[in-house]
Image (cartoon, grey):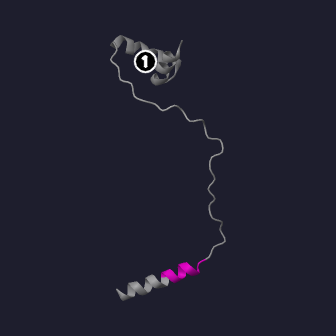
Amino acid sequence: MKDFDKKLEQFKNKAKDFSTNQPLQEVKPKVNTPALKEPEVQLNVLIPKSLLVQLKRNAIEKDIKLKDLVIELLNKD
């Protein structure tokens, strides 16, 4: 155990004496952060299977997510 303590002390001294010319990493915050979105909540509803199939088909045809299609439909005035 004394040998380990001796090696640990030597390592500690080497680490103290070690110097490098490499710059430290600089951390910068993001400049252009997107506007915060409204918080999302989960909606669970039971609908007829035929309507779900229609929703899925429409989402595929528009090449958008089902979630985005439902939001788009709910936002229509």
Residue 16 in percent (x, y) is at 55, 80
Image location (x, y in percent) of residue 58:
47, 15
Is 17 a magenta residue?
Answer: yes
Task: Give the camera-side residue of 61 and 42.
Answer: 42
Q: Name the residue: 44% across, 82% down.
A: 8
User: Predominant secondary structure in magenta?
Assistant: helix
**In the image, residue 71 above or below residue 28:** above
Q: From which residue to which does the magenta span run?
A: 11-18
Q: Quadrant of residue 15?
A: bottom right
Residue 52 magenta-drawn?
Answer: no
Query: Residue 28: image x %, image y %?
Result: 63, 53
Image vertical order of residue 5 relative to residue 57, above or below = below
Residue drawn at x 40%, y 85% is: 5
Residue at 49% x, 23% y: name it: 68
Query: For the residue marked with disc 1, what is the amino acid?
Result: Lys
Examine the rendered structure and indicate whether residue 65 appears above or below residue 35.
Answer: above
The 10 Å Cα crowd at callout 1, few under 14, some 14 to 19, many 20 or more, is some
Q: Residue at x 49, y 81 (%)?
A: 11
Q: Which SS class for mark 1?
A: helix
**What percent of the width, then of the height, locates residue 21?**
67, 71
How many numbered tags mark residues here? 1
Can you say which quadrant of the picture contains the C terminus?
top right
Q: In this rendering, would 9 be left or right of 30?
A: left
Residue where numbered disc 1 is placed: 56
Q: Quadrant of the N terminus?
A: bottom left
